[in-house]
Amino acid sequence: MTKAINPEREARILEAATQLFVHYGYDKTTVNEIAHAAGVSKGVIYLHFDSKDDLFEALIRHETNAYVEAWMKRIESDANGGTISSMYRNSLYALNENPFMAAMFRKDSKVLGSYLHRMGGLFKSEQVQGTRMEFVQMMQSAGAIRSDLDAKVIAHIMNILAYGLVSMQGVVDPDCIPETADLIEGIADFMDRAITPADGGNRLAGKEILRQLIDQSKKDIER
Amino acid sequence: MTKAINPEREARILEAATQLFVHYGYDKTTVNEIAHAAGVSKGVIYLHFDSKDDLFEALIRHETNAYVEAWMKRIESDANGGTISSMYRNSLYALNENPFMAAMFRKDSKVLGSYLHRMGGLFKSEQVQGTRMEFVQMMQSAGAIRSDLDAKVIAHIMNILAYGLVSMQGVVDPDCIPETADLIEGIADFMDRAITPADGGNRLAGKEILRQLIDQSKKDIER
DNA sequence: ATTTGACCGATATTATTCAATTGGTCAAAT
DNA sequence: ATTTGACCAATTGAATAATATCGGTCAAAT
């Protein structure tokens, strides 16, 4: 659906929906509640979206975009921008600060509800982590990651650590979990030590590649 | 319960129970089925265990013991035994090869079923990962882990990686997951690069500390 | 002495019904 | 032209009852 009417209101709806979905989950959030929270009536929702599912998918696109944007912003304003460890660290901060994306990554059935099972449209589980391997490979050829490592393994370890970041509550004793910032910095430090080439890596190339991938990702989201 | 009668049969029962629990889960496995699979009648089960729960807890002790034993065995017969990366790597192999322990670590509700919610006895979520932080601290003071790192963070990263090892199926696209051995070696390599002191660390001390902790752990399990 | 499995009560499952809720529409109000 | 909310069909889920299953026991069999 591409109703270009009243984008400000559409944003308000998406914002309201995000919060409700994250808090109550897809199933337990009604279209009425979303409308009410956004300060409009139910009918208006259907002026913007074909169905609840359609709204949800718009929301996925919206949040994915916001996540990528936040990530990029962090990188741009990061002193040591180009290193993989900085890129990765910033992706973790961005992921951690976006509860909806975190839920998506976690495949949290509490939040995603019945949508998780149907899963027609997007959500081939690739939205957040899929391109990671290409990314690693590109970074390797650019000399930003040691090339003697298996790209598949590195990418997967990155996935595991990101997954762990947003999934360990409820798995281990809460006071075994460090302060979020400490953890992210620790993880980034690990990455740095483990995968940065001896010569320190090519920062500019790294940053440029990331920008490309993000632009690519944005286009993927549009359509 | 400490019926010392017929330990061979008890082992058979535990073995049968393990397989059934792992495959069908706690709730969907009946005492009858366990008895049948172990080649005894239901009554015999209650000669060895007070209740289904009691059997399950015996099983937790049994498997925890088996896991620790397997871990130790691997370490003993490991060329470069004392390094933390080797210890950690071997713990991952041991965890990965013990489906029940993996399920415990994962807090897999499919396997643990209703027991997970009641959770009276053991299972303060500490069985597999709890002591990890002490372990890291001891290793640090023994000079086997860089002491400028936050023990809590290291321990938690270790937990995340172990958790990821046994939890990523169903979260990411299956063919994003590397061969198990490749992954474990990759993780161990990460650990090695990130936390081994510049001087290579004190191997003998490390090995000794581990032995102590394992003995301790064994005693904890007994009672 | 040891083992068995029919038996029992409690719990869980299934079937069925029926009222309430929800996603989605659209005639009326603004 | 835009927005609303009463309205509808479909789905959900609460309530109930009927049924089956299962954990646990123990008198009888071995």
Image (tube, coloured by chain):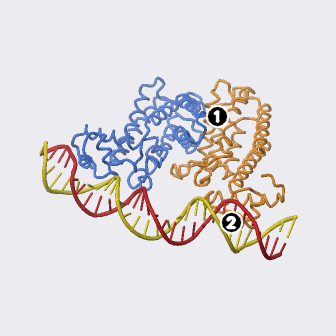
Chain colours: A blue, B orange, C yellow, D red
A68 vs B153, left or right, is left
Residue nearest the viewer, comparing B4 with A115? B4
Location of residue B205 (image quadrant): top right
Q: At which x and y percent is residue B5?
A: 84, 58
Residue placed at 68% from the left, 30% from the top?
B196
- Give the residue pinned by disc 1: B155
The disc label shown at residue B85, or none: none
User: Which of the marked residues, 1 or 2, is nearer the chain's N terminus?
Assistant: 2
Amino acid at circle 2: Asn
- Point out which mark residue B32 bears: 2
Answer yes or no: are tags 1 and 2 on the same subunit. Answer: yes
Q: Secondary structure at mark 2?
A: helix
Chain bearing tag 2 is B
Residue plotted at (68% across, 62% down): B31
- Tell me the residue at 64%/49% (across/down): B102
Q: Can residue B80 be seen by looking at this rendering?
A: no
**Observer-nearest residue: A145 or B116?**
B116
Is residue A80 left or right of B203 when viewed as pictured?
left
Between A164 and D13, which is closer to the camera in this rendering? D13
Q: Is residue D6 above or below residue A12?
A: below
As displayed, is residue B97 above or below residue B89? below
Chain under numbered label 1:
B
Instruction: State the CA–CA distance, disc 1 to disc 2.
Output: 41 Å
Residue B195 appears at what percent x and percent y? 66, 31
